[in-house]
């Protein structure tokens, strides 16, 4: 159905969904008049208007039938009766059984007390993030607190792009606000593709896994609840290698392959000597929209904007000024390891992917997003998670002053900053 406005009602038959793309320029209001329905696994409260920001794409699914009312303009909206939801909820039921078994086993048995560690893989635009959200929300609805791990540095579901992050999901995920940011564990990679520095990406994935492992060992409840890991859509060459690296590093025991036969058979083949790992192929939803590079770029920009200004522009970031001498900015990677003179004859100096390089603050930093590290010493930067981000709005070389936006006023939690290639033009 093409775009239209005015208040209108849509009647959904059982196991059907209403797929909506909100218009570019105005929000859309929607409410459930009767029946029951959910958005990405989270139930919609009856009779309450929900407001969806511009450009959002979502689907309202009903198991038993529902009437939906919409107020506002959509880019498109249509109903579909072919959805993969039955197979998704079957996966959820299997995971639920595993969580219950893990909870019932004695915590002394490390293997048995470990709940499902699910990794969702597949090409770009195959609905990985949506499937992850559903599995997390359904699990939270049953009273579990599963851990969401996001390895997709291109888009970033937990925080801004260029990061890998994890957070416990304690309630079904809000269809509008998304994932709450109370206690995320965030590592800053600083680029939106892993090819810039593959080794660094792997090291950060390992650091994140190690930290979660420590948390699980002291918390039987979150150990039994397990985790859902969302990955990038890069599945060839290095991308494939990074999928295997993640499966290995997080000890994933359920691999869900979204809409890709070839990837599924490759993974089944390479993992056949791991009897405790299940590889399951799932259909991708027909509602998945393919998005070009330009759209992705825009989406990244909105994610960064959201971090500073909030989803509906309701936050006011603070503009702060610091002296150059108050901040220590580092880049990770780049620069040769050893001078040529120290190498065997004919050997080329290789760039060290984990080398810390102190960077002088200069005009090149304008419009870059920097991470504020929790490190106490420079040599802890690579292995430390980050407190948050700042956005550089002005560099005054004469006065040696840097002006930046931060989510809150006052001193930064640390003087150590990490720079990558993450830029944002505040429009």
Image (cartoon, rainbow, N blue to C red):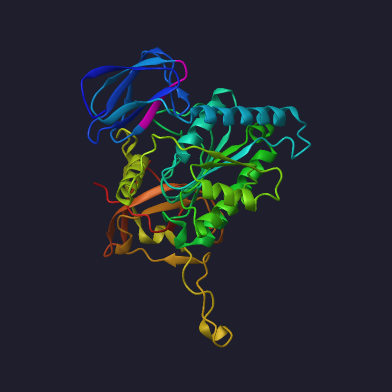
**Front residue of this view, candidates 417 and 178:** 178
Horizontal relation, residue 66 to residue 141: left or right: left
Does the image show residue 182? no
**Front residue of this view, candidates 386 and 168:** 168
Q: Main secondary structure of the magenta part?
A: strand
**Front residue of this view, candidates 67 and 412:** 67
Residue 329 image-quadrant placement: bottom left
Could you say where residue 303 lies in the image, as x and y percent from the top left? 36, 43
**Front residue of this view, candidates 272 and 233:** 272
Could you say where residue 77 lies in the image, as x and y percent from the top left? 30, 28
The quadrant of the image that shows the N terminus is top left
Quick check: 415 above or below 283?
below
Q: Which residues are magenta?
A: 58-64
Residue 81 image-quadrant placement: top left
Which residue is at a point 48% across and 65% down the rendered structure image? Answer: 333
Which residue is at a point 28% across and 26% down the rendered structure image? Answer: 28
Does the image show residue 315? yes
Residue 50 image-quadrant placement: top left
């Amino acid at each position: 159905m093409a775009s239209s406005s005015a208040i209108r009602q849509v009647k959904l038959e059982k196991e059907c969904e209403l797929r909506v793309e909100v218009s570019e320029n105005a929000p859309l209001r929607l409410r459930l008049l009767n029946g029951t329905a959910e958005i990405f696994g989270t139930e919609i409260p009856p009779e309450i208007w929900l407001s969806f920001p511009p450009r959002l794409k979502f689907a309202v699914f009903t198991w038993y039938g529902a009437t939906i009312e919409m107020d506002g303009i959509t880019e498109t909206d249509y109903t579909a009766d072919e959805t993969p939801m039955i197979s998704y909820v079957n996966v959820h039921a299997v995971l639920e059984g595993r969580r219950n078994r893990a909870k019932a086993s004695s915590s002394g048995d490390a293997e048995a007390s470990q709940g499902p560690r699910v990794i969702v893989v597949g090409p770009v635009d195959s609905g990985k993030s949506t499937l992850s959200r559903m599995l997390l929300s359904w699990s939270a609805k049953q009273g579990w607190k599963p851990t969401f791990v996001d390895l997709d540095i291109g888009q970033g579901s937990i925080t801004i792009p260029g990061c890998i992050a994890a957070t416990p999901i304690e309630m079904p995920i809000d269809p509008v606000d998304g994932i709450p940011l109370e206690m995320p564990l965030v590592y800053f990679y600083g680029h939106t593709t892993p090819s810039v520095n593959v080794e660094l990406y792997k090291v950060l994935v390992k650091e994140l896994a190690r930290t979660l492992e420590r948390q699980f060992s002291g918390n039987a409840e979150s150990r039994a609840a397990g985790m859902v890991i969302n990955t990038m859509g890069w599945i060839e060459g290095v991308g494939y290698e990074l999928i295997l690296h993640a499966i290995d590093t997080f000890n994933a025991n359920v691999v869900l392959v979204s809409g890709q036969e070839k990837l599924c058979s490759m993974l089944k083949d390479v993992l056949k000597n791991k009897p405790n790992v299940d590889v399951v192929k799932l259909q991708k939803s027909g509602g998945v929209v393919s998005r070009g590079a330009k759209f992705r770029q825009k989406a990244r920009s909105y994610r960064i904007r959201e971090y500073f200004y909030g989803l509906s522009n309701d936050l006011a970031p603070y503009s702060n000024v610091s002296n150059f001498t108050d901040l220590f900015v580092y880049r990770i990677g780049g620069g040769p390891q050893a001078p040529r003179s120290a190498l065997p004859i004919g050997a080329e100096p290789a760039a060290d992917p984990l080398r810390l390089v102190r960077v002088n603050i200069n005009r090149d930093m304008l419009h870059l997003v920097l991470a504020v590290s929790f490190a106490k010493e420079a040599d802890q930067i690579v292995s430390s998670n980050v407190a948050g981000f700042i956005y550089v709005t002005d560099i005054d070389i004469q006065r040696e002053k840097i002006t930046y936006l931060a989510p809150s006023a006052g001193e930064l939690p640390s003087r150590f900053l990490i720079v990558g290639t993450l830029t944002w033009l505040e429009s």
